[in-house]
Every structure is written in structure tokens, then in C-alpha cells.
Image: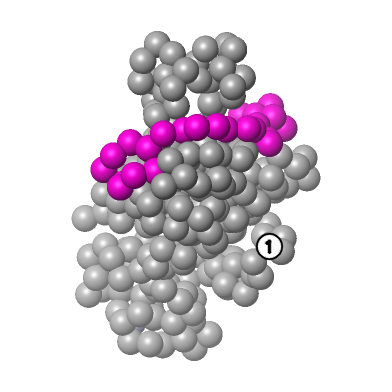
Amino acid sequence: MRSREPAICLRTTDYSETSQVVHFLTRQTGVVRLLAKGTKRPKSKSGGAIDLLSEGDLLFSAKDAETLGVLMEFSETSSHTALRRDAKRLNTALYMLELVHEMLAEGDPHPAVFDLLHRALQRLGQEDAPVPAVLAYFQWRLLRHVGLLGGLDACVSCGLCVGEMSDRAGVYFSSRLGGLLCDGCEGSQREKFHLEPATLEALATLAVAEVGRRVSLPDPPARSVNRLLGYHIAQQLGKRLKMARHVLGELGDGLFSNDV
Ligand SMILES: [Zn+2]
């Protein structure tokens, strides 16, 4: 089946001296894995090898999820050059690609995730973009979309609202339950991540953020949200993403000190 769709390059591997296997996130078909014949030749139609983050109009023929599809034509509309000039922005963008690739199954359409990634990459290319806030919004929205994050306004165990918790310094996050635990319920759960009150506030801001609108989050709480969600992702996948170290770096391997 032939399709022409907007697409973002998530991953590439060498196939032969002149060809690549390229994983794209397409808007209507979701993630597709395509054989891109001859793209590594300098005079190829795509103008050379297809690069990570490259966004454009893709013509392809896909088969079932097990069989490699074929890239027929790719015309790049953006290579996101602005964000490539800054290591922090570039690493954040590469982390987003890795995350999307891990979270979505092949051939499973998620137009909302395509739009989310498209907008996040655009925003990262703008000089005034606060990188931690852009990443916090991206991770939060993606996890909500794939159903790995519940409402974060009450204890998942006893239902007590965050507003009614007498000690907000005693709030925890359980990755296994995908939600918050109050001080009283925390003891019964072995795996948990402690949350500062400022992190809770930042999560509440994200919860009411409208799709496509800019979110205003100060840097330190945005970083805490990123560490929390990075922890949750690592727990869910059973591994750390390759780019996590560069993006959530300051916590390093201490990220897992809560593990039992
Ligand atoms: Zn509770």
C-alpha cells in the first residue's frame, strides 16, 4: 500500500554501502521501517543520507509490521538546523526521538504524537525556548497519551486529594501504579519516588496546559518533572534510554537510588 505523508526521521541504520534502513514517524500510519535504496549516494533523490530529525514529505510503500517497507521518495521540508547548533537542544531532541521510538509500536497510528513531536522540535529551534519546560511538557503529554500516567491530583491507593494531604512534603510517585502515593500509603509500596511540593505544582500546571499552547514552567521544577518522568520511563521500559544520561544528566545513576 502506497502512502504519502508528513514524516519525521526517528532512527537510521546502515543497510549497505549505499542504502539505509530508516524508521520514520508518519502522521497517519505511525512508525514505519523502510528500506531507503541508494540514499547514501551523494546524487540520490533525497540529496544524500537521511538524517535523524529530518522532517518532510514521505512517499512509501508499507507491508505488514514484520516486513521492511520501501521508501520511494523523501523531500525534506526541515532539517531543524537551528536546534542542531546547541548541544543541549540537540540532545533533548534526540532523546525525544528515542522516547517516541520506544513508546510506539510499528504501524500503530498516533497523529497526536506526530503533532506533539513536530511542535516540540519546532519550539526547541527557537532561541527563547526554555528547554526543560519544553521537555517536561513533551514527556508528560506523551506518557498520558500512551496511558502510562494517571491523574496526579490524588493518592492512587486511598484517593486522598493532594490538596487535602496535610504534609505535602510527604508525597511519592509510584511507577508501578502510575500515580501518586500519600504519606500514609507510601509504606506499603516498595518502589517509589519522592516528590517536592514544587514538582507537584509543576505537574498541576502541566495537567491544565492546553494542547499547542506554551506552558510557563520555571526551570528547577521543570527539571524535577523531567527527572521524575525519566525515572518512570526507565522503570516502565526496564532500561534507561541512551540519551537520558545527557538530558537528565545531573541525577546520573542516582536516578535509581529509589529502586529496591
Ligand atoms: Zn494514600
Q: Secondary structure at mark 1?
A: loop
Whether 221 is among the magenta residues is no
Query: Residue, x 38% and y 87% (percent of image)?
Result: 159
Q: Is residue 179 visible?
A: yes
Location of the C terminus by quadrant is bottom left
Where is residue 245 drawn, in percent x and y?
44, 36
Q: Is residue 192 above or below residue 124?
A: below
Query: Residue, x 54% and y 27% (percent of image)?
Result: 51
Give the left or right position of residue 184, taking residue 6 as reference: left
Query: Residue, x 40% and y 11% (percent of image)?
Result: 17
- Residue 213: quarter of image: bottom right
Nearer the observer, 2 or 20: 2
Where is residue 118 drawn, in percent x and y?
62, 49
Q: Which amino acid lies under the numbered mark 1 shown in the image of this protein?
A: Gly
Looking at the image, which residue sits at the far front? 1
Where is residue 238 drawn, in percent x and y?
26, 49
Nearer the observer, 246 or 114: 114
Looking at the image, which residue sits at the far right? 128
Q: How is the image coloured?
A: one colour
Nearer the observer, 5 or 163: 5
Q: Is residue 127 above or below residue 42?
A: below
Using a 10 Å C-alpha cutoff, classify the residue at mark 1 as few (fewer than 14 neighbours), some (14 to 19) or many (20 or more). few
Give the left or right position of residue 38, taking residue 214 as reference: left
Residue bearing the label numbered 1:
212
Where is residue 95 drawn, in percent x and y?
49, 40
Q: Is residue 132 visible?
A: no
Residue range corresponding to the magenta coloring? 62-91
Query: Residue, x 37% and y 61% (percent of image)?
Result: 193
